[in-house]
């Protein structure tokens, strides 16, 4: 027989808990002549059985039911599912903490967070010590803060010496420029050779004569300046070329010198997310292939205030060209570019943001080949020395996806005119 204090010590419970269990009828005390409670070995073993049942995640009420009658199998199955869910959540939490300590990959976490809270994700990365350029690259390229440094070193090695950082072609840039000029005041003033342009004959001198009274053009995400050089050669715009990568801007500066175009282009190293310019400063904003960094829909809204009334926004963006892409392609781009929509949806977003559609066309095959063929050759060159590189594996995967694009996705050029407020 056990006194209540002895039983409490033996089972690791408090005196008040034992009294509560006695009130519920789980154990039964006998009064001794001196008035003290005493409990039997059967009470002790019943309490140990109760503790074992509680260890399975059952509530006290459920434990009592199990002690008094046959086990409710359905109840146990439900409880098992709850525990499995809790274990999965705990394992996920453990993996995250482990990854944040540098013991595992954070790629899946970054991808999920980017989908659910992109702006908060960016600000959090900056608070972890990444500057904005590094944070944006982490979001879109490495996707793992623990491996970012090595990933970016590999990525920059892959693209070292390549001219283009994405699909594009001079002819596509000129077609978009023609669309802008055909809708400008220059046409009304008779400065444009209308017939030759409509016939598709891009006359350099007439294009220069048709510039928007030497207006201002801002190119956002200019990269190494492939489109910048086209705009500088074929228009009289005063061009501001903006990128957040100084090495790209240095390459652009060098490429302008032999063409004697350095006086026409002002170079600015800054963020596309926080443009350091005055409201309504530019006649045209131009962005080929980089609006995805902040999301094309957001760019339509944010950049509008820097465009003069009746000014233009020209951008190229990755879009679906079918409403029913393959599961493989849909899954890939949902991870890589969640903001990707159809041409029709992007045009609808532009109109809702306050633009009129002037022209829209898919980039030429030349634009794709001019990017992917040199990139593929570079991959073949580097594979023997970068077999374990995640950056190289990701670029290889993009090449595989690009080979399956026909009829399913494309880059689309949009020429938009800012409506009056």
Image (cartoon, rainbow, N blue to C red):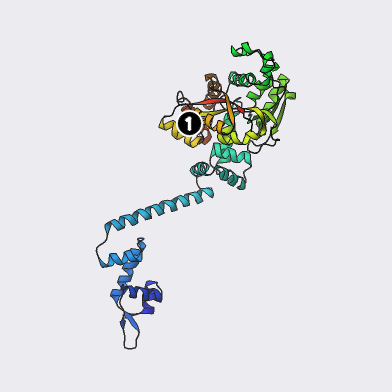
Image position of 185 (left or right of 122):
right
The single residue placed furthest to the bottom in the displayed view is 34
Q: Quadrant of residue 216?
A: top right
Q: Quadrant of residue 421?
A: top right
Residue 12 sits above or below residue 207 on the image:
below
Image position of 47 (left or right of 328):
left
Residue at x-position 73% and y-position 24%: 264
**Tag count:** 1
Image position of 72 (left or right of 261):
left
- Looking at the image, which is closer to me, 32 or 228? 228
Assess disc 1: are there few (<14), some (14-19) or many (≥20) residues with their C-alpha within 10 Å of its C-alpha.
few
Residue 55 coordinates in the image, percent (x, y) = 36, 62
Residue 267 sits above or below residue 62 on the image:
above
Q: Which quarter of the rendered picture does the N terminus lie within? A: bottom left
Provide the residue designation for mark 1.
397
Quick check: can you spot residue 388? no
Residue 379 coordinates in the image, percent (x, y) = 53, 27
Residue 281 coordinates in the image, percent (x, y) = 70, 32
Residue 138 coordinates in the image, percent (x, y) = 57, 39
Quick check: can you spot residue 242? yes
Q: SS at mark 1?
A: helix
The single residue placed furthest to the front in the displayed view is 421
Q: Quadrant of residue 175?
A: top right
Residue at x-position 37% and y-position 74%: 20
Image position of 364 (left or right of 272):
left
The single residue placed furthest to the left in the displayed view is 70
The single residue placed furthest to the right in the displayed view is 263
């Amino acid at each position: 027989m056990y006194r209540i204090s002895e039983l409490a010590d033996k089972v690791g419970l408090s005196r008040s808990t034992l009294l509560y269990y006695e009130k519920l009828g789980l154990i039964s005390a006998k009064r001794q002549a001196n008035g003290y409670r005493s409990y039997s070995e059967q009470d002790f073993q019943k309490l140990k059985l109760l503790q074992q049942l509680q260890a399975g995640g059952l509530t006290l009420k459920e434990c009592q039911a199990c002690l008094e009658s046959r086990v409710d199998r359905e109840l146990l199955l439900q409880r098992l599912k709850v525990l499995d869910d809790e274990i999965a959540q705990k394992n996920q939490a453990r993996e995250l903490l482990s990854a944040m300590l540098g013991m595992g990959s954070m790629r899946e976490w970054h991808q999920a967070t980017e989908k659910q809270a992109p702006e908060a994700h960016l600000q959090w990365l900056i608070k972890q010590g990444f500057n904005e350029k590094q944070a944006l690259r982490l979001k879109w390229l490495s996707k793992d803060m623990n491996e970012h440094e090595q990933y970016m070193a590999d990525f920059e090695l892959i693209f070292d010496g390549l001219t283009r950082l994405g699909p594009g072609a001079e002819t596509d840039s000129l077609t978009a420029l023609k669309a802008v000029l055909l809708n400008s005041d220059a046409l009304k003033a008779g400065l444009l050779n209308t017939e030759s342009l409509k016939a598709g004959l891009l006359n350099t001198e007439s294009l220069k004569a048709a510039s928007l009274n030497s207006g201002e053009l801002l190119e956002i995400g200019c990269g190494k300046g492939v489109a910048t050089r086209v705009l500088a050669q074929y228009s009289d715009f005063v061009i501001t070329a903006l990128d957040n990568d100084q090495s790209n801007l240095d390459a652009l500066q060098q490429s302008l010198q032999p063409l004697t175009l350095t006086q026409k282009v002002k170079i600015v190293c800054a963020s596309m997310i926080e443009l350091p310019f005055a409201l309504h400063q530019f006649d045209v904003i131009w962005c080929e292939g980089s609006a995805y960094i902040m999301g094309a829909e957001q760019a339509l809204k944010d950049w509008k205030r820097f465009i003069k009334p009746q000014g233009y926004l020209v951008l190229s963006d990755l879009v679906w060209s079918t409403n029913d892409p393959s599961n493989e392609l849909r899954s890939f781009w949902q991870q890589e570019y969640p903001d990707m929509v159809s041409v029709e949806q992007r045009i609808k977003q532009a109109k809702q943001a306050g633009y009129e559609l002037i022209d829209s066309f898919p980039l030429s095959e030349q634009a794709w080949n001019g990017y992917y063929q040199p990139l593929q050759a570079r991959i073949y060159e580097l594979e023997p020395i970068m077999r374990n590189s995640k950056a190289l594996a990701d670029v290889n995967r993009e090449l595989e996806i690009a080979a399956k694009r026909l009829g399913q996705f494309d880059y689309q050029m949009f020429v938009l005119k800012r409506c009056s407020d």
